[in-house]
Amino acid sequence: MTRPMVELRGVHKRFGTLEVLHDVNLRVDPGEVTVVIGPSGSGKSTLLRSVNHLEKVDRGVVLIDGELVGYRRSGNRLHELPEREILRRRARIGFVFQNFNLFPHLTVRQNVTEAPLSAQRRPRAEVEELATRLLDRVGLADKAGEYPRRLSGGQQQRVAIARALALRPKVVLFDEPTSALDPELVGEVLDVMKDLARSGTTMIVVTHEIGFAREVADTVVFMDAGRVVEQGTPGQVLDAPRHERTRAFLSKVL
Ligand code: ADP
Ligand code: MG
């Protein structure tokens, strides 16, 4: 049996009295694409943020490639790791946000090279060469010297994807990567994501783009009110949902 790249076991998370994740179990194997769908407020962003330990879960465990991101184990006790060790581990998890979150004072190329150089301390020659390849891959070779504000939203998001890949991530998390884009720019970002999916990148994608899910997802997860209501292949969840809540949600987004 292959070791999962991402595994959540019995994850619970509350904010005060609000239960945001309730007994979430999820397994993403290497090279697989999991698409998470569900209504606003159902816990999708919290789920992604828990995967890279931006949120600490209250119960259960999150494993990346068999390793706890935020803790070390001694006996059956968990001890939180020092911040720099957490940052080091988090660097192997790419995160692409709805609003791009590029560094505005850095060029496109510098956005891509910054973390590999400063956080991962990799050799500059190697990182620069990788940046050139990644910008070419996302179709932005000619924009390397530009600043983010001079790019369209679709271009900025493609830079953000190149930046995430530059970390040599074990998994890339996408939180509604096309929701802030004008409709005519959505396709160019989805095309880059499809290319990644086909080339074996492990991905967890929160999106309302059902067509994307149908085309590239190995697994579709439907969440509602902090729970995984159902998960399965796109055919199972999107075409033959077993739960009324899934059907009701799909009837709104399809
Ligand atoms: P989704 O991404 O599916 O829209 P979220 O994970 O962002 O859902 O949020 C799930 C619930 O948790 C919502 O009710 C939201 O208001 C609440 N929530 C999210 N982050 C926080 C926070 N830092 N403090 C308090 N409540 C939060
Ligand atoms: Mg969200």
Image (tube, rainbow, N blue to C red):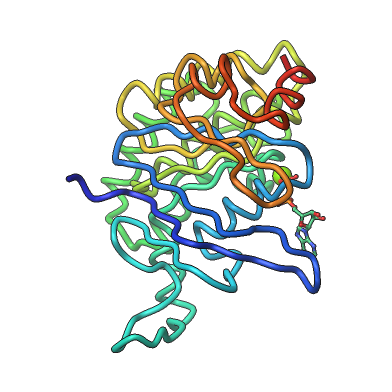
Foreground residue among 132 and 175 = 175
Image point (37%, 38%), residue name: 202
Tell me residue 46's x, y (percent). 65, 55
Q: Is residue 38 left or right of residue 198?
A: right
The answer to whether residue 111 is seen in the rendering is yes
Q: Does residue 165 lie above or below 16 as drawn?
A: above
Across and down, in percent, residue 84 comes to 44, 77
The quadrant of the rendered image in which ligand 2 is seen is: top right
Residue 129 occupies quadrant: top left
Q: Is residue 214 left or right of residue 44?
A: left
Image quadrant where one finds the N terminus: top left
Along the line of sight, which residue is nearer the eye, 221 or 190? 221
Q: Could you tell me residue 246's position as x and y percent?
A: 68, 29
* Towards the viewer: 132 or 246: 246
Q: Quadrant of residue 240?
A: top right
- In percent of width and height, residue 168 lies at 33, 46
**Residue at image coords 53%, 21%:** 213
* Horizontal arrangement in the rendering, residue 134 relative to residue 241 (left or right): left
| Up/down of 218 relative to 45, above or below | above
* Quadrant into which the C terminus falls: top right
For this orientation, the residue located farthest to the left is 1
Residue 141 visible, this orientation: no
Q: Is residue 27 left or right of residue 211?
A: left
Number of marks: 0
- Residue at 39% across / 88% down in the picture? 77
